[in-house]
């Protein structure tokens, strides 16, 4: 596998454009030719800047993860109580403008479970660790992280249901009911 060249302004620009493309089209069937055309480049330039298609996918997953981590940091910095913070997380997840990111997250999460050695490697496990760290801070740490895991399961379940049905009202009511029990 060729080494990835050092970061450059053009690489950063193309990563952002490719990320916007991936939010709409996903990563599963991504082909370099249509992607390159959409971002105003060529497959050859993308391969030069990212080293391989696998490394480009890894960079795109990293870009989506950066957005997720920014959300977690924002909630952490807000200093809200546990219930308010968890509901703030849900409200952000439920906003229609985040559907592309959430579909990308679901794709990366699922693929990392069935293709653990590809560019998806560690994506699901890293996501779980990131969210459990924040939820553990908000909810207080118990010996096994059971409350944080239960809240994360409620958020993830609501999120998958929301992505499948686009029923914000019902999924929000369900998440709020779960959070009231799990994070009083």
Image: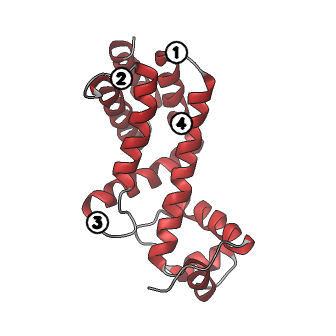
Q: Secondary structure at mark 3?
A: loop
Q: Residue at x 48, y 29 (%)?
A: 90
Lower sequence index among marks 4 and 1:
4
Q: Secondary structure at mark 1?
A: loop
Along the line of sight, which residue is nearer the eye, 117 or 34?
A: 117
Judging by the rendered image, the residue that carries numbered circle 2 is 141
Lower sequence index among marks 4 and 2:
4
Lower sequence index among marks 1 and 3:
1
Disc 4 versus disc 1: distance between alpha carbons? 14 Å
Judging by the rendered image, the residue that carries numbered circle 3 is 115
Q: Residue at x 40, y 27 (%)?
A: 136
Q: For the residues carrying marks 2 and 3, which lies nearer the camera in this image?
A: 2
Residue 72 bears which disc, if any? 4
Q: Is the N terminus in the top left, top right, bottom left or bottom right quadrant?
A: bottom left
Residue furthest front as drawn: 143
Disc 4 versus disc 2: distance between alpha carbons? 17 Å
Disc 1 versus disc 3: distance between alpha carbons? 38 Å
Lower sequence index among marks 1 and 2:
1
In this image, 45 relative to 172: left or right?
right
Disc 1 versus disc 2: distance between alpha carbons? 15 Å
Judging by the rendered image, the residue that carries numbered circle 1 is 81
Q: Position of residue 11 (x, y in %)?
A: 67, 73
- Mark 3: few, some, or many residues within 10 Å (few <14, many ≥20)? few
- Residue 144, quarter of picture: top left
């Amino acid at each position: 596998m060729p080494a990835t060249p050092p970061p450059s302004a053009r690489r950063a620009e193309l990563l952002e454009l490719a990320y916007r493309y991936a939010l709409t089209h996903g990563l599963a069937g991504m082909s370099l030719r249509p992607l390159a055309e959409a971002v105003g480049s060529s497959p050859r330039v993308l391969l030069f800047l990212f080293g391989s298609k696998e490394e480009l996918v890894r960079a795109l997953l990293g870009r989506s993860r950066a957005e997720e981590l920014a959300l977690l940091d924002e909630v952490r910095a807000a200093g809200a109580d546990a219930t308010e913070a968890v509901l703030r997380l849900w409200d952000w997840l439920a906003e229609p403008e985040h559907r592309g990111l959430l579909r990308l997250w679901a794709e990366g999460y699922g693929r990392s479970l069935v293709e653990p050695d590809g560019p998806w490697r560690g994506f699901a496990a890293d996501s779980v660790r990131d969210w459990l760290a924040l939820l553990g801070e908000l909810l207080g740490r118990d010996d096994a992280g059971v409350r944080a895991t239960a809240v994360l399961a409620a958020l993830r379940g609501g999120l998958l249901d929301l992505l499948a049905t686009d029923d914000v009202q019902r999924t929000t009511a369900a998440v709020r009911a779960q959070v009231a029990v799990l994070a009083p």
